[in-house]
Amino acid sequence: MVGAGPDYRPMHNQRNRAPHYRDKDRNVSVTQPLNTRHTAVLLPGTGSDDVFVRSVFKAPLAVVGVPVVTPVPVPGPDLVGAHLAALDEAAAAGPIIAGGISLGAHLAASWAARNPARCAGLLLALPGWCGAADGAPAALAATYSAADVRARGTTAALASAVRGVAPWLAEELTRAWTAYGDGLADSLEAAAACPAPTSEQLAGLDVPTGIAACTDDPVHPAEVARTWAAALPTAELCSTRLEIIGADPAALGRAAVLGWLRARLRY
């Protein structure tokens, strides 16, 4: 379950306070969706796709009135460049909330570091490493999978990749990997070779940031998410578990959005 840290204390000010009204019939205060005037542009993780990103973020962001754009991956060696170009295109009309899952979180934060005036906030789920990969589990997994795809083909490599994993994850991998077609191995290698933002780069991102971690994910260690949260000036970290995401993918999005809302209160 998503939970607040033991030291969390809500902070309120008029600039960041969500609009609300008094329902006299029920004698309660009703919070209305935030009027952020920004669109969230969210990128998928390594070997994943826009379908999963929407299942994670669309519903939680709809609750707070934030529209979502989920660019479709462009398989091949230029995968990373295509993701970054999608952020550039979306921000042409004004600042955006950037984010994503795993590789998508890395790219969103790196893009924001280079485009601070075009980023209004960050939603970062399951970061895999900081700076160079240096043997990070997520990078090793992508490198191994790419080699297996090249050696035995997608069908055989996929069969190995889904063996023993939770059914929901097997379903996600099967759909996404199949859609990557002949560009799968190149895409996996491009993701594994792409550096994440450094702690110094993260320290320069003073925008409201929600970070989501899974306490039971060995591929995206929660310690990495804690490192990111400590480096970012205005970030809040919330956690969930993979077993919960299996039943409800939006649990991951709710963790990131909850962190973002808390960060807005002290921005």
Image (spheres, grey):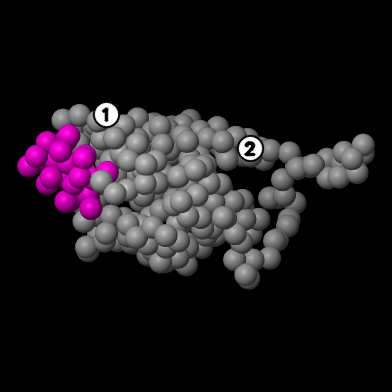
Residue 132, percent across and down? 25, 60
Magenta segment, which residues?
Answer: 141-162
Q: Which residue is mark 2?
A: 63
Look at the image and say whether residue 146 sits in the magenta stretch.
Answer: yes
Q: Is residue 81 visible?
A: no
Residue sitting farthest toward the left: 151
Rounded to the nearest angstrom, the CA distance separating label 1 from label 2 is 30 Å
Q: Residue at x 22, y 63 (%)?
A: 134
Residue 133 sits in quarter: bottom left
Type of secondary structure dominating the magenta stretch: helix
Residue 260, percent across and down? 56, 51
- Comparing 151 with 51, the one in front is 151
Q: Residue at x 60, y 35 (%)?
A: 62
Query: In this image, 21 relative to 228: left or right?
Result: right
Query: In this image, 39 relative to 164: left or right?
Result: right
Q: Residue at x 40, y 46 (%)?
A: 101
